Amino acid sequence: MERVTAAPAALRDAITRHARYSVAQPWNTLSSRQIFQCVGLAVRDLMIDGLLQTQQRQRQADAKHVYYLSIEYLLGRSLANNLSNLGIYDLCRDTLRDLGADLADVEESERDAALGNGGLGRLAACFLDSLATLDMPGYGYGIHYEYGVFRQEIEHGEQKEKPDNWLASPTPWGIERPEDACLVPVYGRIEHGVDRRGQYNPMWLGWRFLIGVPHDYPIVGYGARTVNALRLFSARSSHDFDMQIFNAGDYVKAVEQQIASETVSKVLYPSDTVPPGHELRLVQEYFLVACALRDIIRRYERDHQSFDAFPDKVAIQMNDTHPALAVAELMRILVDERDLAWETAWEITQATMGYTNHTLMPEALETWPVALLEHVVPRHLQIIYEINRRFLERVASGSPDDHERLRRLSLFEEGTSKHVRMAHLAIVGSHSVNGVSALHSRLVQTTLAPDFYRLWPDRFNNKTNGVTPRRWLVQANPLLAGLITRTIGDGWITDLDRLRALEPWANDGAFRTEFLAVKRSNKERLSRVIAETTGVTVDPDSLFDVQVKRIHEYKRQLLNVMHVVHEYLCLIEDGTSPTVSRTYVFAGKAAPGYWAAKQVIKTICSVGSVINRDPRVNGRLKVVFVPDYRVSLAERIIPGADLSEQISAAGTEASGTGNMKLAMNGALTIGTFDGANVELLAEVGADNIFMFGLTTDDIQRLRADGTYHPRDLCTHNPHLKRIFAAFDSDRLCPDEPGLLRWINESILDRGDAYFHVADLPAYLDLQHRVSEEFGRPAAWAAKAILNVARIGRFSSDRTVAEYARDIWQIHRV
């Protein structure tokens, strides 16, 4: 596309034109938010030019596309990222300065597009950036939620969920496409009949229509050669009321029916603890795949007369189990609507679909009650039954008497109520099943789906996650990015392996000094954020010990708290001053219905309040919980981190991407042998990372032999005994007696499901070594520089290139 950098006047004219004709106000009366709207629209104009050129180029090449189906996309803010990828960030800053505006203020006025809850959604966003940067033909499909993940407020230490209406102010990025709206049938019944050839012909009748209206968000790659799109669907009811209801005089009921249809895209992850929320979540998942599949097929049929070439032109990747109904929906379209033979349709479906598994946690592996599927998508349930029948017949032909194996492989889970196992549906319906780190992929094969792996070993593979350096280094940490570019050039931005050229500079005193100055500046910025959001003043010269991620028991924020309490007790009871001052930074959201996770937040806040107010501590320890963790906040916290806490119980974290972002920004990792930590260790070297704790095999053995007794371990370790005694007393919660006793009950009395006590002694010892290392700034800086230099493997460009080569078979256009 034509680069705007050659014509600075054009950008100024575009911005002021939108002020006049889009916002309809004089420039000197505009607020920062309105200026953002003008700048965003001017930038979108450039991206639309690129989008149209990209689509024309890809269509002329009859290129194979990947279509990425994800229930989440955690995009964050887009202005700075788009300006940077277009190559006009400096031009826009200078143009706005000439117009009397500050680009930094304009950026702050943009609301995060928080259409995701954590790593799953952020990974999807990183993949879109990499696809465009690599010039790969790729579309993302998702839901255009009106309310994203909730806005988190902390009141008296408790998480309060507030609605996050990110669309309350118009966004300049989305392009509504009503002409491409999709009709989505839901509910209804199946009538059994035969066709004119005497073949069984089930008819799905009595359904109600939803209308999916697409909104395209252009995704510009770095260098602006390629602009792909993320297509998000909002739900609309039919334009017509149910006239029978209306004519019967019940106007209110007619309107209510219309409103109910539109709730489908209202909110990300409605609560599934009550039946209506559970049903709505299923409808959402079907709405996503139905809209996506209709749109994909419409695109394909525009240029192709038959489905013979469908797998050669279309790759569909299911991001976890949420889109697994895509298997049944594609079969339904091919068999019911396009009249293909079942065998032909199944061959096409398997060759087209790929499935990424993101979790080993049983509670996160989706299953749906058969009764609910029959109510919402009765034809799809019928198709799943038929897929299962044919699949089990084939399995049984090789081992007809192994009924237990058939039970394990079945798409249906028997019990008090019958459920469909969505992971099984995704595995059976795909030609590729991948995990997201080497360790996780091995566990998928050996513990999650061993029977499937033995059946189809070639179907399983690993694709270790990555993050985009454009967002997480160029944009989030411009000071470090600038230092790197001045030192080794800018080729690393699209080829992260080139950061290896920094390795010799780890021993250069002047470079280390500059590197530490960049870190100090980022810590000062983070200190201001902490003061503004929590009211706590922290010392930028202290060690910033950071754990930022979703709050969950397996991620073990409690293990971190145990170390905090240990340091506090050593200080006030033993008179042992910490080797270095520390600021413990926590951030993350707990699922609204997850009591234990919300208690973890309450615990962090209570412990922090006691420590921060204790005059005996004298500022040597500070504990802060920064509310409302989101992409824009992560961009402030991550560059300021000295120590990255990646301490999940081994075998529970599929990959992690926070570990990659923090190391990329020069934080040293303290971590367990879990997820991608294992690969991070291999890349950065054992001398530049702090690893501890049980391995996955250790934990599996302890679980199997029943020899793990956390209370006994505490009894024989005075440090552990003192920590848990503090939780049992009220010294860490003087204003709320008994607040922390749940910790002892959960860990000491109920078996410690995530092995906090088993790993705690090694964690405490290693944290002492961390403090000693931080007390030697030159040596610490060298280790941090080597973390940056050796992070190249964890670029999402590498990950996407592997997907493209091994699974999707797509190429640059």
Image (cartoon, helix red, strand yellow):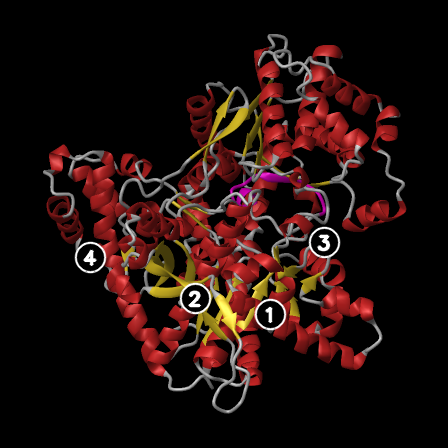
Residue highlighted by disc 2: 206
Residue highlighted by disc 3: 416
Residue at the limit of the structure toward the top, as seen here: 615
Q: Position of residue 158 (x, y in %)?
A: 54, 25
Circle 4 or circle 2, nearest the eye = 2
Q: Distance between the Cα atoms at labels 4 and 3? A: 68 Å
* Label pair 4/3, CB-CB below 8 angstroms: no
Residue highlighted by disc 1: 384
Q: Is residue 435 visible?
A: no
**Viewport quadrant of the N terminus:** bottom left
Q: Position of residue 500 (x, y in %)?
A: 55, 54
Q: Distance between the Cα atoms at labels 3 and 2? A: 29 Å
* Label pair 1/3, CB-CB below 8 angstroms: no
Circle 4 or circle 3, nearest the eye = 3
Q: Distance between the Cα atoms at labels 1 and 4? A: 57 Å
Rendered position, 200 above or below 736: below
- Say what amino acid the circle numbered 4 marks: Ala
Query: Could you tell me which residue is drawn at 39 percent across and 77 percent down?
Result: 300
- Element type at marker 3? loop
